[in-house]
Every structure is written in structure tokens, then in C-alpha cells.
Amino acid sequence: MSNLLQGKVVVVTGAASGILTGLYRVRSPVVTGLALSAVTVRSAALRGIAVAGYNDLRLQRGLAIGIYNDARQLRGVQIGLINRARDNPSWARWLPLVNMRFGE
């Protein structure tokens, strides 16, 4: 699925690329591009930018901006009130304002 998807809730069962905007939620197994939501962005793999109150990402490659960002594997930058990068060293798993990890 590509191009522009928008609505109150955007749920894509396959890979999505382009611009996805959802008032409540954007959810897709793979997101390439820009995902915007007032409440939640959830994806198994993000390559691009996610902007939401809560970003729940398994593999993040790119930028996440939100109040709470949670990435199981971070390859990029998180900007938010609370940022969690589960694969960072223990001292850097939970950081306020900015968290990042590159490589591997």
C-alpha cells in the first residue's frame, strides 16, 4: 500500500509506504515514510518518521517524536518526554528528551 492514507484509525495489514495519518491510531507491520497520529503509531518495522503521543516500534530506523517512544531495536533518534530503547546499554535504555543509537 502506498501514497496517502488517512482517517480516525488507519490499520494496514501489509507494508505501507508514503504518508499515513490517523487521528487515533496508525498501525502497520511495516511503515516506510511518515506516520502521524494524535495518539498511537504501532509498527514492527519503521523506516522513516513517526509522530504520535505514543510510538510503539519493534525496529525503528529513523526518527520518532512523541510523549513516550518505545523501540525494541533503535537505529535512529527518539525525541520525547520519555524515550525507551530496549537494545541500548542499561544506562541508556530510559532517557528523557533524546535517545539514540546507530550502527549494527
Image (cartoon, rainbow, N blue to C red):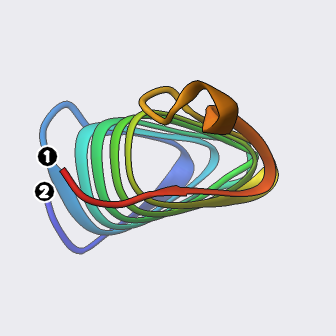
Going by the numbered disc 2, the residue's amino acid type is: Met
Q: What element carries label 2?
A: loop
Viewer-side residue, 3 vs 52 = 52
Going by the numbered disc 1, the residue's amino acid type is: Ala
**Residue of label 2:** 1
- Asked where in the image residue 94 lies, by quadrant, the reply is top right
Q: Residue 83: which disc?
A: none
- Asked where in the image residue 1 lies, by quadrant, the reply is bottom left
The image shows residue 10 at horizontal and vertical percentages of 44, 43
The image shows residue 34 at horizontal and vertical percentages of 41, 70
Left or right: 54, with 36 as reference point: right
Viewer-side residue, 56 vs 7 = 56
**Residue of label 1:** 15
CA separation, marks 1 and 2?
A: 6 Å
> Callout 1: few (<14), some (14-19), or many (20+) C-alpha neighbours within 10 Å?
some
Left or right: 100, with 53 as reference point: left
At 25% from the left and 58% from the top, the residue drawn is 103
User: Nearer the observer, disc 1 or disc 2?
Assistant: 1
The relative height of residue 1 versus residue 39 in the rendered view (above or below) is below
Left or right: 57, with 16 as reference point: right
> Callout 2: few (<14), some (14-19), or many (20+) C-alpha neighbours within 10 Å?
few
Viewer-side residue, 59 vs 21 = 59
Q: Do the residues labelled 1 and 2 touch (CB within 8 Å)?
A: yes
Q: Is mark 1 on a helix, strand or loop?
A: loop
At 53% from the left and 53% from the top, the residue drawn is 7
At 76% from the left and 43% from the top, the residue drawn is 95
The image shows residue 20 at horizontal and vertical percentages of 41, 62
